[in-house]
Image (tube, rainbow, N blue to C red):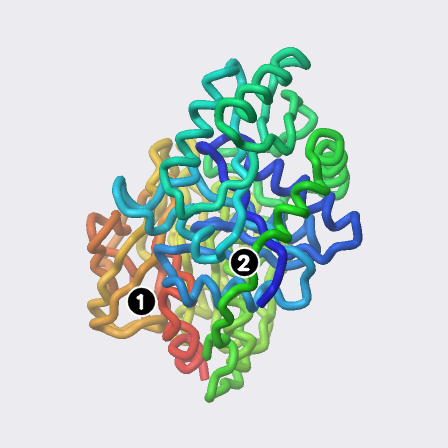
């Protein structure tokens, strides 16, 4: 496959990767290009902005959850029909799943894709030191093709001139843009990062403003030239997940709204490829469930909308009865919280669906990272003896209100209670462990097969 592509990697977190990535994506789209967005790592929020900025679903590329072939497959399947691919990195450019290996890093994905890289650096209160930082990134791994840098949060014209000169002369790296500090180009944040795009009401105004900012301060034409330097890619076959031998006549309900928005596009596509008809449900406005055979509730922010979830008593009752009917239900993180009896936020408890004998309590400490689960009991998603690669990111803790049965033992990371996860009751599985279909492909036919 021969497609222009570029990876935007940050020197660290909070350097402006997402704001700059979205601005570039929208600016390229305004030039009439079909832009295919990607996000490195296990992230749901940034891809939601990518989707609205470009008009195309963003795909996740993750070297921990996916091997090289799976990364290439996801990239190529998503890129078909597009003119350029823009990949937003994660964390710092070389940060990975541990202190030594590159697995899971933006650098690893850039090498998989054989893509040129543009570094994004926060140079606030820096000048000559910025050159040393950028040079270190160039020399750390010569297998990465770092072709340019964008310098963010400069203090004024004099500062901009000094830091540009330092990076170009001392680090030997072309500066493609120098961006001033500006409160006009920020995205609202909360405890888990950016506020999801599904909650933003002025997206077009935001995206157009970011695109104007990018056009003013970044050499977009040069970014395009660098993207076109990418050589043709080794082509791989499309995953059987999207061309299955067996299809299922299943009506799958998915709670997807402002509350629950954490879903991988590849998983939704795989469900549809296997024959499932997807029915989207709004937990805040709909009083009843549609006629469905299975239910999937993803992650999100039930703690932000706890009162409104409590007020929708009719839907909570229907979800509780659906779980009790023995039909398969899969709930990840926020979905787990919704299926419990209560959700405690700042000392106040809100009633949830009430199917699982537990309450969740919001705290200030977060649980973040890649997770490895060992399946110890058959469940609607996986079979005993299987190994699951996933991730977790939550601020809540679980307080059991009765005996819990578990489907997973956690080998890496934390579980729901200690090292146990995957709460199993009837045909309902609720877990803090998020799965990507490429990390565990059997989850799709397993879940739909249970429903059929």
The residue positioned 71% from the left and 45% from the top of the image is 26
Give the mark toward the camera: 2 or 1.
2
On screen, residue 154 versus residue 210, left or right, reads left
The residue positioned 57% from the left and 49% from the top of the image is 6
Mark 1 neighbour density, 10 Å: few (under 14) some (14–19) many (20 or more): many
Q: Quarter of the image containing the C terminus?
A: bottom left
x and y percentages locating residue 338 in the rendered image: 44, 53
Is residue 263 visible in the rendered structure shown here? Answer: yes
The residue positioned 53% from the left and 67% from the top of the image is 268
Q: Residue furthest top?
A: 158
x and y percentages locating residue 148 in the rendered image: 56, 37
Residue 59's label in the rendered image is 2
Tell me the CA gap for discs 2 and 1.
Answer: 32 Å
The residue positioned 63% from the left and 21% from the top of the image is 181
Residue 310's label in the rendered image is none
x and y percentages locating residue 151 in the rendered image: 58, 27
Depth check: give the residue in front, 304 or 89: 89
Mark 1 lies on residue: 425
Q: Quarter of the image containing the N terminus?
A: bottom right
State the SS at label 1: strand
Position above or below: 396 against 437: above
On screen, residue 97 versus residue 74, left or right, reads left
Depth check: give the residue in front, 321 or 368: 368
x and y percentages locating residue 445 in the rendered image: 42, 79
State the SS at label 2: strand
Position above or below: 266 against 415: below
Tags 2 and 1 touching, CB below 8 Å: no
Depth check: give the residue in front, 177 or 22: 177
Depth check: give the residue in front, 311 or 434: 434
Mark 2 neighbour density, 10 Å: few (under 14) some (14–19) many (20 or more): many
């Amino acid at each position: 496959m021969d497609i222009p592509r570029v990876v935007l990697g940050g020197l660290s977190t909070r350097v402006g990767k997402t704001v700059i990535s979205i601005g570039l994506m929208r600016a390229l789209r305004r030039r009439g290009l079909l832009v295919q967005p990607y996000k490195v790592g296990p992230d749901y929020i940034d891809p939601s902005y990518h989707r609205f900025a470009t008009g195309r679903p963003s795909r996740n590329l993750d070297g921990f959850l996916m091997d090289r072939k799976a990364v290439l497959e996801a990239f190529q399947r998503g890129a078909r029909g597009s003119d350029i691919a823009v990949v937003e990195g994660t964390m710092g450019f070389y940060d990975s799943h541990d202190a030594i290996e590159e697995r899971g890093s933006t650098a690893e994905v850039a090498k998989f894709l054989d893509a040129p890289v543009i570094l994004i650096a926060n140079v606030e209160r820096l000048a000559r030191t910025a050159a040393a930082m950028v040079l270190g990134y160039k020399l750390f791994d010569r297998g990465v093709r770092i072709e340019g840098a964008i310098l963010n949060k400069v203090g004024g014209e004099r500062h901009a001139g000094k830091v540009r000169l330092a990076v170009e002369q001392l680090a030997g790296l072309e500066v493609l843009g120098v961006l001033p500090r500006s409160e006009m180009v920020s995205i609202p944040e909360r405890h888990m990062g950016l506020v999801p795009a599904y909650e933003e009401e002025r997206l077009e105004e935001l995206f157009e403003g970011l695109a104007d900012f990018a056009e003013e301060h970044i050499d977009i034409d040069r970014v395009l030239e660098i993207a076109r330097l990418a050589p043709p890619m080794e082509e791989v076959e499309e995953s059987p997940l999207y061309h299955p031998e067996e299809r299922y006549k299943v009506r799958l309900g998915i709670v997807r709204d402002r509350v629950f928005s954490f879903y991988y596009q590849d998983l939704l596509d795989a469900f549809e490829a296997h024959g499932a008809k997807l029915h989207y449900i709004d937990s805040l406005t709909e009083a009843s469930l549609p006629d469905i055979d299975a239910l999937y509730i993803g992650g999100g922010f039930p703690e932000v909308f706890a009162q409104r979830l409590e007020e929708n008593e009719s839907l909570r009752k229907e979800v509780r009865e659906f779980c009790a009917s023995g039909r398969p239900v899969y709930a990840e993180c926020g979905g787990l919280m919704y299926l419990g009896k209560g959700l405690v936020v700042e000392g106040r408890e809100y009633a949830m669906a009430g199917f699982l004998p537990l309450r969740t309590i919001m705290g200030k400490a977060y649980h973040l990272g890649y997770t490895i689960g060992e399946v110890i009991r058959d469940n609607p998603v996986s079979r005993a003896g299987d190994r699951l690669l996933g991730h977790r990111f939550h601020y809540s803790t679980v307080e059991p209100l009765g005996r819990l049965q578990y489907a997973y033992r956690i080998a890496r990371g934390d579980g729901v209670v200690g090292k146990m996860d995957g709460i199993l009751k009837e045909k309902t599985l609720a877990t803090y462990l998020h799965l990507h279909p490429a990390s565990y492909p059997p989850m799709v036919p397993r879940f739909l097969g249970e429903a059929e």
